[in-house]
Amino acid sequence: MLCNTAMPAPVSSEERIEVVSNTDMKVMSYRDALHWTMRDALRCNDAVVLMGQGVDDHKGIFGSTSGLVQEFGSERVMDTPLAEEGMTGVAIGAALNGLYPIQTHIRADFSLLAMNQIINLAAKYKYMFGGKFQVPMLIRMIVGRSWGQGAQHSQSLQSLFAHIPGLKVVMPSSSQTILDTYPMVIADYQGPVISFEHRLMYDLNFHVDSQSMNHGSDPFGSHLLRQGEDVTIVATSIMVLEAMRAADHLAKVADIHCDVIDLHCVSDPDWDLVMQSVEKTGRLVVADTSWREYGVCAEVCRVVAERNPGYLKQPVVSLSMQPSPCPTAKSLEDLFYPDLHQFVNAVAKLVLGHEAHEVQLPDTQSMVDVYKRFKGPF
Amino acid sequence: MNSMTMFERLFFQALRIRLVEECIIDLYPSDVIQSPVHLSIGQEAVAVGACHSLRHRDLMFCTYRSHAFYLAKGGSLNEMFAELYGKVTGCARGKAGSMHLAAPDVGLMGTSAVVASTIPHAVGAALAAKRLNKAQVVVGVFGDGATEEGVYHESLNFAALHGLPVIFLCENNGLAVHSSQKTRQHYDILGHAQSYGLPVYAISEGYDFVKVAETMSEVITHVRTIQGPAFVEIQTFRYKEHVGPGEDFSCGYRDVEDCQSWKQQDPLERFPDLVKAFRPIIMQEIDAAVHFAERSPFPSIEELLCDVV
C-alpha cells in the first residue's frame, strides 16, 4: 500500500540531512520530516490534495509545504479562503467522493472555527450512517509557543478532539514519529485523523532510521523510549523531549531511572504499555502540552484508577500549563509552562518521597530558550 | 408506467412520498417509530422534480427533512421504514433514524440534523468530481434558514471561485422552525447568490413537479456541460409542524388560509381521481415495507461499538 519515495528526498533544507554513520541513521529536522511526508503523499497518491491557508505561499506552513505547489500545481496544493468550517466541510465532501484531503491550520486555535464539521460531521459520518461511508483525511494543527503567541495562538487542543468518538488524535514528538505515522495514515487509514504538530520542534534535528520507517509499525502506537525502574513518565509532543532531558539528568546526578512513554496517539493510547510500566515502577508522572483539567493528565489518571490504582505507591504528579489563558509577556509565559527545573524537582520529590531530596536541579531556564531556533514573529 | 405521461409519472412519485409520510403519521401514536420525524408533506414536488433528471451516480447531500429526497433519489423503502423502526435492516443499521437517511448506491450521500452543515460537503464532492473527472453533478439541498449560516456563504464562494459542478438547491418553505423568513433575513436570497457570480433560477410554484423537473433538467444540463455551479430557489409549503406528525396552525405563528390557498394549487389535492387510481399499488408497497420493518430484528449489542472508527 505504501509507496515511499527514496529517503532522503530533496527537502526544504537539504543541509540538515547528513549521514552520521554507515548505518541508516540520518539527521532530519521535524520540518523536513513533515515536508518529506507531504511530498511523498502527493507523489504516491494522485488523490491527495493539500489544502489550507498559505500552503502555497513563500513561507509554506513554516517550510513544511514549500515548493510543493510548483511541483504539483495549484489544483493539488490549494490555498483556501479564510473559511475554516467551510473548508473542513469541503474536505469531508471531497473525501466522500474519492480524494484524500490534507488540511492545515497554521495554528490549532483556528480549528475551533471548524468544530461543527470536525465533531458533528467528520467524527460521526461512518457511525451515523451505519458504516456506509468513510472520511479519510488528515488535519494538521500547529501548536504555537513563545515569542508572544498569547492566548489565541498557543492552545494545545488535543483533549477536545480526543474526547470525541470517531476521531484519531496524534501528537508527533519527533521526525521519526512523523515518518512512521503520516505515510501509513494517508495510505491505509480510512477515517479522520488530527495531528498536533508543535511549532517549537519544527527547527529541531532528530536522528531518523530510514530502514525502520513505515515497515508495519502501528501509526497509532505509543512508544516506550527509555527504561527505568523508579518512575513512569507519560508524555506528549514536546513534553516527551522534556521528559527525556529530565530522565537523563536524574540518571546522571541522582541514580534515578525513568520509564519514558511517548503516548503519541492520545485518543487511543496503548494503555497496556502504560499499566505495565506503572506496575513496574509504582510511580507516575504525566507531562502534557495543555491544561491538566479534563485533559490528557486527567485521562491517564482515570485509566490507572480504573484498571489498578493499587499499582501506585504514591500519588500521581502532573505537569502541564497553568490554569489560565496563555499570557504574552515572556516573564509570565515562562511561569505559565513548566520548565526542566520543575520537571526534575517533581520527579525527584516523587521518587525520594520528600521535598528536601537534595538532588541537584538544573538551572531555571525557559524551555523556549532551549528549543527555540527562531526569532519571531510567528 | 411507460405509457404514463411525465405528469403522471411525477404525480405517482410525489403521491408515493406523501402516502409514505401519511403512513408514518398513522403509525406514530403507536410509538413504533421512536425518532423525531420532519415531514416533507407539501414539499414533495421539490424532491421529485429535482431528482427527475439526476442519474444515480450524481450525488446529493440533504437535510434532516429528507424522506422525500431519499425516496425520490431511489432509496429503498424497506430500508427506510426499517431505519425508522430502529431495526438492523435499516439503511444505517438503526443508527440514523429519520434524520440521517443515506443511500450511497443511488447517490444520496448523507443528511444532517445541523442546519447548513452538508452544503460544503456538496461543494467538496464536486471538487473531487472535477479533479477525478467523474462527470458527476452534485446537489446540495438546504432550507431558507441555512442561508443565514456562515458556512453557506463560505460554500458558495468556494464553488464559484473554483468553478465546481454543484447545484445549490434552496427549498424555501419560509420557516425556520416557527420563525418566518422576514424576521430573520435582511437580504434577498437570489440576489445574494448572484453576487457570487452564480447563475440563479427561481421557481415560485414549488407544488408544480413538472415545472420543477423541467427547470432542474435545464440547470443540471447546464452544470454538467460547463462544469460550474448554479443556484436554484424553489418556494414551497410545509403543511405539518416543524417536527412531528401534527398540524400546528392553531399555534398562531402562521395562517391556515395560506396553507389552504397553497393546497388549491397542489396536484396531489387537485386530482383525487389520480390519487385513487395510484393509491392501491403504492399502498401495497408501503404495507410490505412496514411488514419488513416489523419483522426485522433490532440491532444487537455488537452493533453498539461497530463502525465508530
Image (cartoon, helix red, strand yellow):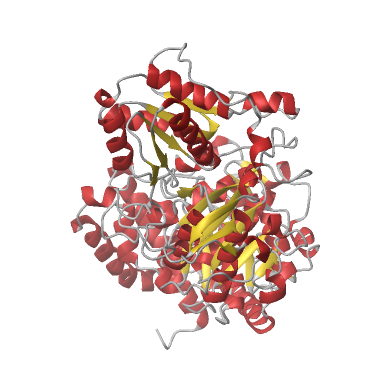
Residue B255 at x, y percent in the picture: 61, 44
Please indicate whether residue B2 sits to the left or right of residue A362 in the image: left
Residue A250 at x, y percent in the picture: 46, 29
- Quarter of image, res A34: bottom right
Residue ID at (19%, 55%): B297
- Quarter of image, res A27: bottom right
Q: Please identify the quadrant where the C terminus of chain B is shown.
A: bottom left
- Number of marks in the image? 0
Residue B39 at x, y percent in the picture: 46, 53
Q: Residue furthest bottom?
A: B3
User: In this view of the protein, which residue sits in the foreground, B64 or B133?
Assistant: B133
Q: Is residue A220 above or below residue A210?
A: above
Residue ID at (43%, 32%): A251
Please indicate whether residue B36 sits to the left or right of residue A63 in the image: left
Q: Is residue B59 above or below residue A262?
A: below
Q: Is residue B55 above or below residue A310?
A: below
